[in-house]
Image (cartoon, rainbow, N blue to C red):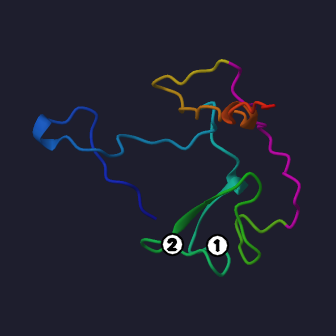
Amino acid sequence: MDLCQFTTEAPPLAERTWGVISGAFTRSDGAGDPATAARSIRSGFGSVIVPQKNHRLVVLSTGTAADAKDKKPAFSPSRAAPSWPHRQQSPPTGWRPTATTSPTRPAAPSPAAARPARTRSS
């Protein structure tokens, strides 16, 4: 596994650079950890996905983070999402990120809004 370079929040001017200041692994609303079975650190995933750097990679899933040969968590052939004890709700309409919340991505324009209106000529 690998993570970007690290920095501090307010380094001296000569040491300023981009990088990770801090991190936390939480649910999108910041309340607690995601389900244990939905995350794992593996040496690979299936026969094709391998770490790009070092010897491990992280697997995150809305179901079980495991392929057919994995244990802890074990593979689950079900296509239905498991019933986790902490169902996550979408952020409320109008929610805006703050310094302590995750950013959201702006909504994509609808296809109709992106296309110019066609006029008919006689």
Return the residue nearer the eye: 17 or 43: 17
Callout 2–callout 1 Cβ contact below 8 Å? no
Q: Position of residue 25 (x, y in %)?
A: 55, 44
Q: Position of residue 23 (x, y in %)?
A: 45, 42
Residue at the far bottom: name it.
47
Q: Quadrant of residue 109?
A: top right
Return the disc, 2 or 1, that comes first in the chain's sequence.
Answer: 1
Query: What element does badge 2 sit on?
Result: loop
Q: Quadrant of residue 41?
A: bottom right
Q: Which residue is mark 1?
A: 45
| Up/down of 114 relative to 36, above or below | above
Q: Quadrant of residue 65?
A: bottom right
What's under tag 2, amino acid-wise?
Pro
Please provide the residue range marked out in magenta. 77-93
Based on the picture, tell me whether residue 89 belongs to the magenta stretch: yes
Horizontal side, residue 77 vs residue 16: left or right: right
| Quarter of the image that includes the C terminus | top right
Residue at the far top: name it.
94
Horizontal side, residue 104 vs residue 99: left or right: right
Q: Position of residue 114 (x, y in %)?
A: 67, 35
Horizontal side, residue 82 vs residue 114: left or right: right
Return the residue nearer the eye: 35 or 97: 97
Magenta portion: prevailing SS class? loop
| Up/down of 89 relative to 55, above or below | above
**Residue at x 53% of width, y 66% of height:** 57
**Residue at x 68% of width, y 77% of height:** 46
Based on the picture, tell me whether residue 64 belongs to the magenta stretch: no
Q: Which mark is residue 51?
A: 2
Query: What element does badge 1 sit on?
Result: loop
CA gap between label 2 and label 1 equals 9 Å
Residue at the far left: name it.
14
